[in-house]
Amino acid sequence: MELFWTLILSAIVLGLLLLLLHEHSSQYARMPPGPTPLPFIGNLLQLNSKALHESFMELKEKYGPVMTVHLGPMPLVVLVGFEVVHEALVQQADVFAGRAVPPLIKELTLDFGFVQSNGERWKQLRRFSLSTLRDFGMGRSRIEKWIQEEVKYLTNEFRKTKGSPCEPTPFLSRAVSNVICSIAFGQRFDYQDENFVKLLTLVDDSMHLFSKPITLLYNIFPALIKLIPGHFKKMLLNVNEIKQFTSAIIDKHKATLVSDSPRDFIDSFLIKMKQESKNPDTEFNYDNLSIIILDFLTAGTETTSTTLRYGLLILMKYPHIQEKVHKEIDMVIGRDRAPAMEDRRKMPYADAVFHEIQRFIDLLPLNVLHMTTKDTVFRGYTIPEGTVVVPMLHSVMFEKTKWATPDSFNPGHFLDENGCFKMSSSFMPFSTGKRKCAGEGLAMMELFLFFSTLLQNFSFRPIEDPANISLSPDSKLIIKILRPYKFMAIPR
C-alpha cells in the first residue's frame, strides 16, 4: 500500500511539473526567433563576452531586427535598428518602460534610487528629481554660469602644464564632477582636495570593475556572487565608501537645513522628506536619497568626462577638424570672452563635431536594460511581462541606412548641403522614450561649454603621430572605457 501511494504522489508531482513546463514553453513559444540555446548556458558560446553588441549585430543578419537571445537561462529580446527601437520605446512607451535590474546592481543598491527602480518609486523620484533639477537651473542660465566658472578652473589647470605632456583624465573628471557637486551638494571642491580625489578614484575604479566580464557572469549566474565573491566585494567596498562620503554631506545639510530656503538638491529632498514624514508609503527616505546622489556622481561624472576625453583624442587624430573648430570659435566668439550657449546656433560646424563625437564613441552600445511591464504583442511576436529587453543604441548610431559613413568620424552627418546644423532622429546617445536619461540637458550644456572653451584656449597635440592614434576602447562590454593617453595642451 505504501508503494502504491508513493507511485500516486510521484505521478501527481510529475504531472504538475509537466504542466508547468508546458505553460512555460507555450508562454515563450511565440517569442521572437533566435539561436537555439543550450541547457544552463543558453547562447553564451555564440557570443563575444567582451562585446555583446558586436555579436548581436551579427545574429541580426540571420534572425532579423527583433530576436531572442539567451544569456544563460535568461531570455533577452534584442532590438536592432532605429525603426524597432523607436517603435518600442516611443510608440509603445508604457509597455517597454520597465527597468530590468541586474542581480549585481540589486545587491549593490537594493533597488533604491530611480535609475534602477520601477513602479511608483520610479515615478515619484524621477518626477521630483527632474522638477528639482529644473528649479536649480538645469538647461538655464544659472547652471550655465556654474559650468562657465568651472571650466575656468579647468583651463587654469591645463595652463599650469605649460604645454608639457599630461594625462587629462584627472583634470576632466574633477571639473565635470564639480558641476554635479554644485547641484547636489551646493559646493565645488578644490582639485587637490584629498577626499574629493579619493571619491573620484572610487567612482573610476567602480566603472572599471563594472566593465569586467565577470560582472556579466554575476548577472547571468547570481550564485557566483557568493561562490566567487572577490570581485563583488571590491565593488561593494567602493559603493559603501562613496556612500560614506555622501552621508557625511547629507548629515551636514540636515543640521543646517532651512525649510523654506533649499540650497541644493539634498536640501530639497530633505524638505520633501519632512513634508511626507507621516506618509507610510513615501519614497522620500535616506536610502533613496543616498542612491540618487550615488547615481548623480557615477553617471554624471563618468559619461561626460569620458566623452570629453574621447572627443579630444579624436580631434588630435584629425587635426584638420580641430583647426576648423578653432576658426569657427575665433570668428563667432573670439578670444576675449567665455563661450555661452547662445553661441551654439552660430557655430554649426563645432556643434556638428560635438554631436558626431557622441555618436561615434558609442558610449553605451547596449543601452541600459529595459523590461516589459505587461504581456504584449510586438511585430507579431508575443513578449511576456517581465521580459528583459535590449534596445541597442549601437545599432541606431551606426545604422547604414541612417548615416552616410557610419563607421567613420564624419561631422557632415549633422550638416546640410548649406553647412547648417541638422539634427538626426537616429541621434540618441541618451536613449529615448520614458526612460531617456534625466541628465541629457545638463550633459549637452556641459559638452558644448567645455569643448568650446577648451578649444578657444588651447590646441591639443598628441605625443605620437596622429596616424598612430588608436580610437579603440580598452573595454566595451557595458560602457566604453578608454585607454589612458597623454597630450600637450598648447595655449593659443
Image: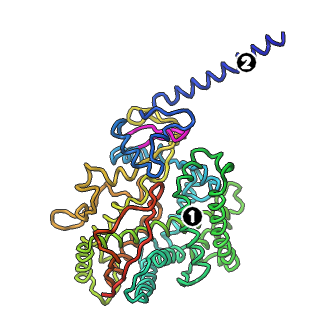
Q: In which quarter of the image is the N terminus?
A: top right
The answer to whether 218 is drawn above or below residue 266 in the figure is above
User: Foreground residue, 81 or 158?
Assistant: 158
Report if residue 68 lies within the magenta region. Answer: yes
Residue type beneath disc 2? Ser
In terms of image quadrants, where is residue 142? bottom left
**Which span is picked out in magenta?**
65-78
Q: Position of residue 349 (x, y in %)?
A: 24, 71
Q: Residues within 10 Å of mark 1 (few under 14, many from 20)?
A: some
Label 1 or label 2, whichever comes before in sequence order: 2
Left or right, residue 130 beside residue 289: left
Pointer 2 residue: 10
User: Foreground residue, 330 or 133?
Assistant: 330
Q: Quadrant of the C terminus?
A: bottom left
The answer to whether 408 is drawn above or below residue 260 in the figure is above
Pointer 1 residue: 206
Q: Position of residue 46 (x, y in %)?
A: 45, 40
Q: In whole angstroms, how far apart are the C-alphas of marks 1 and 2?
A: 50 Å
Q: Where is residue 90 in the image (x, y as percent from the top left)?
A: 40, 48
The answer to whether 373 is drawn above or below residue 340 in the figure is above
Q: Is the magenta stretch mostly helix, strand or loop?
A: strand
Report if residue 110 lies within the magenta region. Answer: no
Residue type beneath disc 1? Ser
Could you tell me if residue 213 is visible in this image? Answer: yes
User: Which residue is painted at 38% across and 58% down in the image?
Assistant: 362
User: Foreground residue, 451 or 40?
Assistant: 40
User: Which residue is painted at 34% across and 76% down in the image?
Assistant: 462
Left or right, residue 395 beside residue 404: right
